[in-house]
Image (cartoon, rainbow, N blue to C red):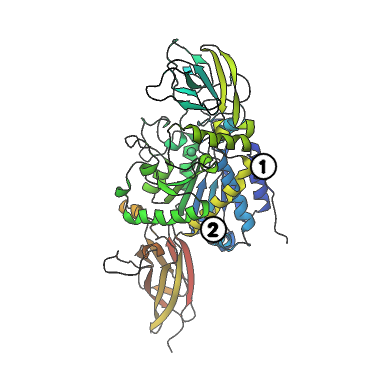
Amino acid sequence: MTTPRVDIPFDRYHDYDAMTEHLSALATAFPKLMKLQSIGTTHRGRDIWAVTLTNPDTGPESDKPGFYLDAQIHAEEHATSAVALYAVWHLLHAYGEDDEVTRLLDRQAVYVLPRINPDGAEYALQPPFFPWCGNGRYAPGEERETGLIPTDLDGDGYITTMRVPDPKGEWKKSEQDPRLMVQRAPGEEGGEYYRLYPEGPIRDYDGAHVVIEKPRDGNLNRNFPANWSNVEYGAFEAALSEPESRAVARFILDRPNIAGMNAYHTHGGIILRPSMTQPDETMPPRDLALYEEIGKVGESLTGYPTVSIYEEFTPDKSKPRHGGLMDWTYEQMGIVSFGTEVWDLEREAGVEKTAYYNLHPRDDETQAKVFAWVLENVGEHGFRDWTPFEHPQLGPVEVGGMVYIWTYRNPPPALLEKLCHDNVRFCVRHALAAPRIEIDDVDARPLADGLYEVRAVISNHGYLPTNLTDVALERELAVPVEVELKAGDGSTLESPATVEIGHLAGRNERRFPWSPWGPEWTANAVPATWIVRASAGTSLEIEARSERGGVARATVAVASAQ
Ligand SMILES: [Zn+2]
């Protein structure tokens, strides 16, 4: 039998129908390894797809540690969906060829949600191009009630920027290149100045101040239960009020075997880790250490450094982000959770990184580097020449500038495949760090005629402990490992069938050679014993169960005393 192959072009962005077609083709070509299901329906009636990948011959998905990967919760972040589709494609095609991938699908289950927000994504993929964020509850143009409504005024298929001559303006044309806009210095007078606004008409204009409302269709990644707050922009009516966040939450809650996760975003070229709301000093030190260790693997494979959202990605510490998915899965489920922000236009253009979340205006030199790169690699899809336009409320303006969604937010499609590959390889390594329960040794020692002591050693062969994180222990979220001897025909148990053995350490605990000043080591292998009455030759089954570390089974045959 020849190995099936499905060709998917990864040098372009796929709309919803194309993505659905590719997923269906993969599911048809790999019916054993892949399951495709809809986990919910959006406001505009689209299915939210979920993919499960595992080799069922080695056990059902629920008996294996799971890894969860999702993409495009934010409408405009098209590169993320490419990463997720590539993950499905790569894992299926590398299975049997690549040792790590083969091990992953044999021993574990991988869950991929390739496009959480398909309604918003579809708006953001079709002209007029604009960085939409919402989820389709409101169509573009309906998401604001008053003030400036982002609209393609000049009909070129892009919603860009208006530069409006104004003596009060904060901006001026760069002396190096009049297409670039730079900030006017404090105290500076005597030049031609401008104000910059998104392209669009102004409803209820008072002739003085241009109101720009925050869109009321929100941000799905503020709609999760952890620290949900109604004062956060984009939080919606209540936690899990939206069909997409509900579907995601249900999917995760129904899979208590999930041991690791990565949610994909653009942009910045960084791997984000918790917390969204707290400084690192409040995180359990062992959790911080394991985030740093796994994060280093991520950096070596992707080139992206790993940083805390609160410490290094929150410009105003008095305004932390609430209701994020990653805080929910880490703080309230104890899952090791990352959020990767793929793509960094400035780094690609040769600009030195000075901050991970950088809202500062860029100087002439930085803008010129980025602009030259965009003209060469994206062309007019990335920059629209400034064009005079008679604005219905503001009079003569110019419309043009950088097309944010196809420059800063998403790479040119030719760069996608490598970005996808590197990021998926990090997922593979992170997934393989899961705890993994094994039954190392079993024997049945005769005590008297027909009476035996059965002993099994239950071990964790994984990098992470069976509780995954200390947060899971502190909040009593982690389910202890248990092991059961199943007495069948010809045997009777004289001791309890199920033995609770607590949690088993992972390799991550022993990062240094033993020292009396170092942290205490805990057991990663524990014996369990039972007393059983059985006739010689009876076969007994032992099953060890860890919620996050999988299920292991072994059999032992009792023999009569010599
Ligand atoms: Zn995002």
Query: Given the current orientation, which residue lies at the most extreme right position?
Result: 1
Q: Amino acid at mark 2?
A: Pro
> Viewed as shown, does residue 422 lie left or right of 238?
right
The residue that mark 1 highlights is 21
For disc 1, the neighbor class at 10 Å (few under 14, some 14 to 19, many from 20) is: few
User: Residue at 36% across / 30% down in the picture?
Assistant: 231
Count of numbered circles in the view: 2
User: Residue at 36% across / 43% down in the picture?
Assistant: 311
Q: Quadrant of residue 499?
A: bottom left
Q: Amino acid at mark 1?
A: Glu
> Which residue occupies the foreground of this view, 462 or 33?
462
From the top left corner, tell me how far across and down residue 146 is, in percent.
46, 17
Q: Quadrant of residue 487?
A: bottom left
> Viewed as shown, does residue 232 lie left or right of 43?
left
Residue 195 position (above or below residue 450): above
The residue that mark 2 highlights is 60
The numbered mark, 2 or 1, whose residue comes first in the sequence reads 1
From the top left corner, tell me how far across and down residue 22 is, in percent.
66, 44
Residue 170 position (above or below residue 302): above
Q: Secondary structure at mark 1?
A: helix
